[in-house]
Protein backbone atom coordinates (compact mmCIF):
# COMPACT_ATOMS: atom_id res chain seq x y z
CA UNK A 1 0.00 0.00 0.00
CA UNK A 2 1.45 3.31 -1.02
CA UNK A 3 1.47 6.40 1.14
CA UNK A 4 -1.16 7.99 -1.10
CA UNK A 5 -3.48 5.02 -0.71
CA UNK A 6 -2.97 5.03 3.04
CA UNK A 7 -3.71 8.75 3.16
CA UNK A 8 -6.93 8.27 1.16
CA UNK A 9 -8.04 5.53 3.53
CA UNK A 10 -7.20 7.65 6.56
CA UNK A 11 -9.04 10.65 5.11
CA UNK A 12 -12.17 8.51 4.65
CA UNK A 13 -12.24 7.53 8.33
CA UNK A 14 -13.77 10.76 9.71
CA UNK A 15 -16.73 10.30 7.36
CA UNK A 16 -17.20 6.75 8.62
CA UNK A 17 -16.96 7.93 12.23
CA UNK A 18 -19.48 10.68 11.54
CA UNK A 19 -21.89 8.15 9.99
CA UNK A 20 -21.37 5.68 12.85
CA UNK A 21 -21.97 8.39 15.45
CA UNK A 22 -25.07 9.54 13.58
CA UNK A 23 -26.38 5.97 13.67
CA UNK A 24 -25.59 5.78 17.40
CA UNK A 25 -27.48 9.02 17.98
CA UNK A 26 -30.55 7.42 16.37
CA UNK A 27 -30.22 4.48 18.77
CA UNK A 28 -29.92 6.87 21.71
CA UNK A 29 -33.02 8.76 20.51
CA UNK A 30 -34.98 5.50 20.32
CA UNK A 31 -33.89 4.45 23.80
CA UNK A 32 -34.79 7.90 25.10
CA UNK A 33 -38.30 7.60 23.71
CA UNK A 34 -38.64 4.08 25.15
CA UNK A 35 -37.64 5.46 28.56
CA UNK A 36 -40.25 8.19 28.32
CA UNK A 37 -42.92 5.68 27.36
CA UNK A 38 -41.97 3.50 30.33
CA UNK A 39 -42.29 6.47 32.70
CA UNK A 40 -45.66 7.41 31.23
CA UNK A 41 -46.85 3.80 31.63
CA UNK A 42 -45.80 3.79 35.28
CA UNK A 43 -47.67 7.05 35.80
CA UNK A 44 -50.77 5.64 34.11
CA UNK A 45 -50.67 2.49 36.26
CA UNK A 46 -50.25 4.53 39.45
CA UNK A 47 -53.19 6.78 38.56
CA UNK A 48 -55.32 3.70 37.91
CA UNK A 49 -54.32 2.35 41.33
CA UNK A 50 -55.30 5.69 42.94
CA UNK A 51 -58.66 5.57 41.19
CA UNK A 52 -59.24 1.97 42.33
CA UNK A 53 -58.45 2.88 45.94
CA UNK A 54 -60.72 5.87 45.67
CA UNK A 55 -63.61 3.72 44.40
CA UNK A 56 -63.02 1.27 47.25
CA UNK A 57 -63.22 4.22 49.68
CA UNK A 58 -59.68 3.53 50.88
CA UNK A 59 -58.48 6.88 49.56
CA UNK A 60 -60.31 10.19 49.56
CA UNK A 61 -60.82 12.16 46.36
CA UNK A 62 -58.58 14.95 47.66
CA UNK A 63 -55.80 12.51 48.53
CA UNK A 64 -56.07 10.89 45.10
CA UNK A 65 -55.78 14.30 43.42
CA UNK A 66 -52.83 15.26 45.63
CA UNK A 67 -51.07 11.99 44.85
CA UNK A 68 -51.75 12.42 41.13
CA UNK A 69 -50.38 15.95 41.27
CA UNK A 70 -47.23 14.80 43.09
CA UNK A 71 -46.85 11.95 40.63
CA UNK A 72 -47.07 14.38 37.71
CA UNK A 73 -44.33 16.53 39.24
CA UNK A 74 -42.05 13.50 39.62
CA UNK A 75 -42.89 12.41 36.07
CA UNK A 76 -42.03 15.86 34.71
CA UNK A 77 -38.77 15.87 36.65
CA UNK A 78 -37.71 12.52 35.20
CA UNK A 79 -38.74 13.57 31.68
CA UNK A 80 -36.49 16.63 32.00
CA UNK A 81 -33.62 14.45 33.23
CA UNK A 82 -34.05 12.06 30.32
CA UNK A 83 -34.16 14.96 27.83
CA UNK A 84 -31.07 16.51 29.37
CA UNK A 85 -29.14 13.24 29.22
CA UNK A 86 -30.24 12.70 25.62
CA UNK A 87 -29.18 16.19 24.51
CA UNK A 88 -25.81 15.78 26.22
CA UNK A 89 -25.18 12.39 24.60
CA UNK A 90 -26.34 13.58 21.17
CA UNK A 91 -24.04 16.59 21.39
CA UNK A 92 -21.17 14.30 22.37
CA UNK A 93 -21.84 11.89 19.50
CA UNK A 94 -22.30 14.51 16.79
CA UNK A 95 -19.26 16.50 17.89
CA UNK A 96 -16.92 14.57 15.58
Image (tube, helix red, strand yellow):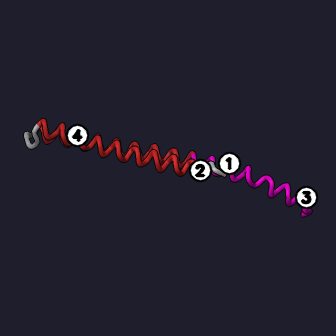
Q: Residue at x 30, y 46 (%)?
A: 74
Asked if labels 2 and 1 touch by Cβ distance under 8 angstroms, the answer is no
Residue 35 rendering spot, x and y as whole percentages: 42, 47
- Callout 2: few (<14), some (14-19), or many (20+) C-alpha neighbours within 10 Å? some
Whichever of callouts 3 and 2 sits on the residue coming sooner in the sequence is 3
In the picture, residue 71 is in which quadrant? top left
* In this rendering, position of residue 17 left or right of residue 2: left
Asked if labels 1 and 3 touch by Cβ distance under 8 angstroms, the answer is no
Q: Quadrant of the N terminus?
A: bottom right
Q: Which residues are drawn in magenta?
A: 1-25
Q: Secondary structure at mark 4?
A: helix
* In this rendering, position of residue 62 left or right of residue 24: left
Residue 76 rendering spot, x and y as whole percentages: 34, 42
Whichever of callouts 3 and 1 sits on the residue coming sooner in the sequence is 3
Q: Residue 17: say if magenta.
A: yes
Q: Secondary structure at mark 2?
A: helix
Whichever of callouts 3 and 4 sits on the residue coming sooner in the sequence is 3
* In this rendering, position of residue 72 left or right of residue 37: left
Q: Residue at x 52, y 50 (%)?
A: 88
Whichever of callouts 1 and 2 sits on the residue coming sooner in the sequence is 1
Cα distance between the residues tagged 3 and 2: 31 Å
| Numbered badge on residue 19 | 1
Q: Residue at x 73, y 53 (%)?
A: 14
Residue at the spot of label 4? 68
Q: Is residue 91 visible?
A: yes
Residue at the spot of label 3? 4
| Numbered badge on residue 24 | 2
Amino acid sequence: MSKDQARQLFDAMPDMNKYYNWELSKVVAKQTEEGKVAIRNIRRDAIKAYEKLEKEKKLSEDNAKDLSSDLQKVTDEFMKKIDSMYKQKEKELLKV
